[in-house]
Amino acid sequence: HAIVADRPVEELVKDLVFFDADAIIATGQRTGHAADLSYISMIKEAADRPTLVGSGVTPDNANDILGIVDGVIIASALKHDGVWW
């Protein structure tokens, strides 16, 4: 569904809750790509679980993101010059 976007984000989040997910993780389009803050907010509002951001978190945007979600997963930003491979 994410590829064709035929269902609203809120419905997809409700599916995750129904299937007993412990947390919801929002990501960008690819490794190291930040998710849009409005997208993150939409997910957080629809979730009754901890919500994390799992890509694109950097020192420049961490405060903005952490103002919305419960936590972040940082990996690419810690790599030398952001080169993850």
Image (cartoon, rainbow, N blue to C red):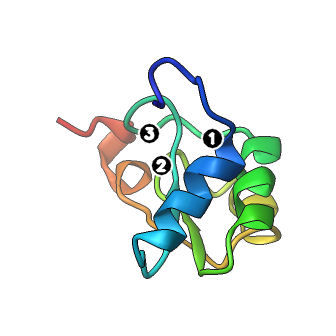
Quick check: marks 2 and 3 in contact, CB under 8 Å? Answer: yes
Q: Is residue 10 visible?
A: yes
Which residue is pictured at 44% across the width and 39% down the height?
Answer: 32
Q: Is residue 58 visible?
A: no
Q: Amino acid at mark 3?
A: Gly
Left or right for 72, reference 38: left
| N-terminal-most mark, 1 or 2 | 1
Image quadrant in which you'd find residue 19: bottom left
Kindly identify which residue carries mark 3. 32
Numbered badge on residue 54: none
Q: Residue furthest top?
A: 4
Q: Amino acid at mark 2?
A: Ser
Q: Amino acid at mark 1?
A: Ala
Location of residue 58 with respect to 35 vertically, above or below: below
Whole-percent x, y for residue 84 in the image: 25, 40
Kindly identify which residue carries mark 2. 55
Whole-percent x, y for residue 76 in the image: 36, 48
State how far apart marks 2 and 3 are (Cα): 5 Å
State how far apart marks 1 and 2 are (Cα): 7 Å
The residue mark sitting in front, 3 or 1, is 1
Q: Secondary structure at mark 1?
A: loop
Q: Residues within 10 Å of mark 3 (few under 14, many from 20)?
A: many
Which quadrant does the C terminus fall into? Answer: top left
Numbered badge on residue 35: 1
